[in-house]
Image (spheres, rainbow, N blue to C red):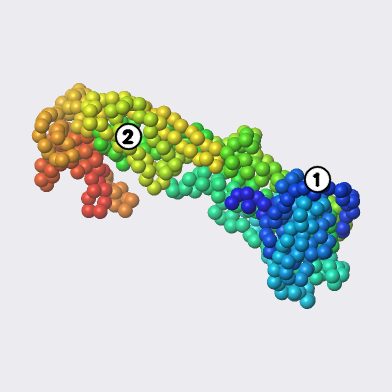
Amino acid sequence: MIKIYIRLMVMTVALGFVVSSCTKTETAPNQPVVATGTATLDKTTAVPGEVVIITTSASLENKPSWEVTLGGQKVVLGRLNDKQAVFLVPALPSGTASLDLSPLGVKEATNMTIGSYAAIKDPAPVYTAFQGKLDAAVTQLEQLTRAALYPIPAQNLAVFKNMQQSLPAAYAAATNAQKLEAAYFMRQLDFIPVDFTNLAERSTLVLNDPSDQFMKIGLQFVKENTKAVVGVSLLAAGGVLSSPVLAIAGGAIAIYHLNQSHKIVDTLINNIGVAFRIDGYSNRSINGTTGGLQLRNGVPKDIRIEATYRTMQPSDAQGGPFLQEMMVGVSELKQARTLMQTALNQMRTGLLGSDVTLAPFSDVKTQAATTTYFLPASGLLIGNVSVAGIALSAVSQPGEVVTLTASSTTITAVTPFTFTATYINAPLGVNVRKTFDAEFSSACDDPAQFALLTGGSSKIWRHVATDGQVVSTYCGRYDTKTFTNARIMTNTYWGGDQVNCTAVNNSIEVQLCGNRLGWVGQNGVVGFPYRIITLTANEFTFEAPSDGGLHIFTYRP
């Protein structure tokens, strides 16, 4: 699909170049060419005024144009690149027409169909309609010069307005035949605006992948750049848009797309959307603390993987296929601007105003800009666990959260291990990996872990281990903790508003199992319905749902 868009882009540039030539220029006579190659057309059916792209099997001569015949009528081809040329379909009767491409080295003539079309008897209404489209395009580009993010240069708008203001005089001076030819061309032209509202930098929404956003901008760039390149190529080939009115109309459409491409390429090369290094993880989870990565047997833990992303850089010319196409597109756009400027300089005398100088395009920066984003969970691969007895599963949640669950049927002791996280984006040529350290422990905590003596009777956790007593199906052993002379701070959230209360409780006794908590004797609670958030010598925090809200309880000495 990207290659198709690039072809379209090239076609637009070719059209733009035809515009630059207000008068037909002479070309050197075609040298004899040995016809051995083949050619294909991007469309086999077309109507007068349409642009057709020819792709040849062999490389083309390095010249701006060729003269061939279509249905016995002479047609000028404009060179797009080493293997592509474009031409404008002339007014021919509907039906099959033979296209003789022998000057390009193509051995056999190619047949194409001139489709059914409404013949234009009076070109004036078509011209008036095109003027209305052109006026609307000027208004749109005026808005883009005032854009807060990457505005188009004011001097480019001035050149576009010069084309708009010069068209009436060129049309008035044209012969009837030239007006009719221009009408068929103008009927096919549309100034289609790009929706720039969704091409901004990456949104803060969790579900947006920075690379997806970058590639979205790239695809739009390819589409628009193709139109610009094709338009310019038509202008560059002296005979394709031979009359001044054709040249100005074609030049206007080419400059229009060049301007939109100018804004898109600025957005593209400044978008930080290529991951190149995994940095670490952020344990902002609903299960576990924000400390080291500790995984208990069978207890899920949510994490997010952090990575450094960058903008495009010169080495991307040898990078992934998508990045290579973007680099080619940027290069083609710069070349198209140079050709368009040459055409404008040549047609300067046919324009009413003096504004003919286009601003140069931005280039990919030598030093890429970087920032840190969370990787999309759906693009992560978790594996390569270093300890054979530990199984590690990873479930991608919507957005950036990955739920890890470590389990083992044989390991009961605290066991350090490692695993890898890999992110691959083949179109961008991205394949990054990092090894993470983790610690595995059994679901039921070793009672010794919670003998958190901190000095002073009011700061002592006391525990009683009760082995073998089944409290719930969650765990076969639990620990009872008593927090003496505790002060409870209850943080209750209702609709986002926090309500703080304090109370004194002389002795609070809880039961703990894994990362779950049960409150001894409270309303006959059995098992461990509450989730522990923090557990230290100085405090423990847990949460519990309540009446549609969420209570966060913190106990401190």
Q: Looking at the image, is mark 1 or mark 2 nearer the viewer?
A: 1
Determine whether the residue tagged by mark 2 lies in a helix, strand or loop. strand
Residue 334 locus on image (x, y percent): 72, 45
User: Which residue carries the number 2 mark?
Assistant: 392
Question: Which type of secondary structure does the marked residue at label 1 adopt?
Answer: loop
Res. 551 in view: yes
Does the CB distance between marks 1 and 2 fall below 8 Å?
Answer: no
Is the residue 381 above or below the residue 163 in the image? above
Using residue 338 as the reference point, say whether residue 346 is left or right of it: right
Say which mark, if any, is on residue 237. none
Q: Is residue 97 or residue 364 the one in the foreground? A: 97
Circle 1: residue type: Glu
Which residue appears at 44% of the width and 48% of the height?
207
- Label number found at residue 61: 1
Q: In the picture provided, is 227 more to the left or to the right than 268?
A: right
Q: Please state which of residues 296 and 555 is positioned toward the viewer in this rendering.
A: 296
Q: Residue at x 80, y 53 (%)?
A: 102
The one nearer the camera, 136 or 217, is: 217
> Can see residue 506?
no
Q: Quadrant of residue 172?
A: bottom right
